[in-house]
Amino acid sequence: MALGGGNFLTQNKVLPGSYINFVSASSSNANISDRGYAAIACEMDWGKENEIFAVTAEEFLTDSMSIFGYAYTSEKLKGMRDIFINAQTVYFYRLNKGTQASCDLGKARYGGARGNDISISVVSSEEQYTVETSIDGSVIDSQTVSSAAELEDNEFIIFDKEAELTPTGKTNLLGGDNGSVSEMAHQEFLDKLESISFNNLGCLSDDETIKKLYAQYTQTMRDTYGVKFQTVIHDYAAEYEGVINVANDSTDSEEEKYGLVWWVTGACAGCNINESLTNKLYDGEYGVFTQYKQSELEEGIESGCFMLHKNGDDIRVLDDINSFTEFKDGKDKNFGENQVIRLLDQIGNDIAVMFNTYYLGKVQNNNAGRTAFWNDIVTYNKELLKLNVIENFEPDDVIVEMGNDKKTVSVTNPVTPVCAMAKLYMTVVVY
């Protein structure tokens, strides 16, 4: 990491940076950054390899064919449609490394089985050739040239510029293969992810070792490096506020029981800090197992499960909670609420960006400099107050003072989070 970050026990850090603790109380440029950013790794039939690439909701809607090899409406993109219901930008990583399909005139731009659905046809006319590229029988590129040397590569084909053009019918590309997911694929994805900022990470696996890898990665990044995000994992009791444990199985297939991770990851990433997912309508495409008894739903909440349940004809989120349940002094039940964690993550990320951008190495650690930093923090908290995500804020409660040495600033920033209503207890008095 370029700058230090994470939790601190004593003021003994070596790297310059922002070290921020979040604890519960005993019994310039104060911008609030946007949410809606998710990250996920999956197997693909088509697409970039060995790199993380960002796709916006708009790009997915208009360019899914060139990015993922399929039309927006394809069954193959069901999970992606689910995550984009609420996410605005998703960082994708392709876990498998495929073999490119090919023919005499060129090869598929990317490896994978989808390349076998591409064909090239050549028609001659007056010493020129019209070369058409088709996928699933639909023409997606047409060029009229005198020789192969004049062909320009398109989104699906890298042409052999030395090939001889002869009139042919449709020639299918052959040999495309998806390959397999290596044991290191998820680790490679997480390593590459360290330099990217996002709100939620999704784990598309039911392998216990991989789920443990994601959970440990999340805790390390949050607590050691100060990178604040939450990870969505299916059926994994991590006992940690940074991990959301999705209890419901998808009923679509035994091999894809974790399918709801797509929707939950997008929903959590896209949820604003002044909102809750409690009672949110599930509008995804996966089948959802909801045959729970009331006692099972209660047990699920008590054990930190993020659950969907049947409410009339609708399927809705039961409670917007994470997997943390071992409440203790310094980390009480507030830390089990995702709305609280989203707020704390927002504060941690935004204040760190503020300090690293405008103060680190630029402002003197004297009364004037600390007063300027105090003013920015107070202004930031007032914005949170306007959004109704904190209450009872008093500027005098914010303390910015010199730390243990001349380069260190120590900040105390008490906040009282506000959560959405979830329970009603009413007494009706009849006279």
Image (spheres, rainbow, N blue to C red):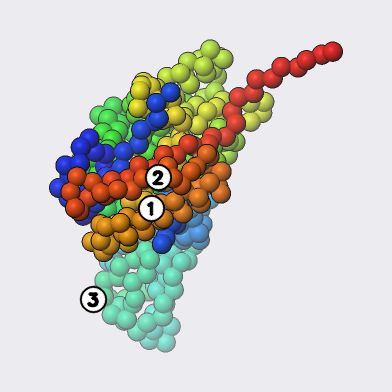
What separation in Å lies between label 1 and label 3 (alpha carbons)? Answer: 67 Å
Crowd tier of the residue under label 2, counting other residues whose Cα lies within 10 Å: few below 14, some 14–19, many 20 or above: some
Q: Amino acid at mark 1?
A: Trp
At which x and y percent is residue 22?
Answer: 35, 36
Screen quadrant of the C terminus: top right
Judge by depth and name the residue closer to the eye, 50 or 47.
50
Q: Which residue is mark 1?
A: 374
The kind of secondary structure element at disc 2 is: loop
Tag on residue 398? 2
Could you tell me residue 409's position as x and y percent?
26, 49
Label 1 near label 2: C-beta < 8 Å? yes
Residue 208, quarter of the rendered image: top left
Q: Which residue is mark 3?
A: 162
- Between 241 and 381, the one lying in front of the other is 381
What is the secondary structure assignment of the residue under circle 1?
helix
Categorize mark 3 by other alpha carbons within 10 Å: few (<14), some (14-19), many (20+): few
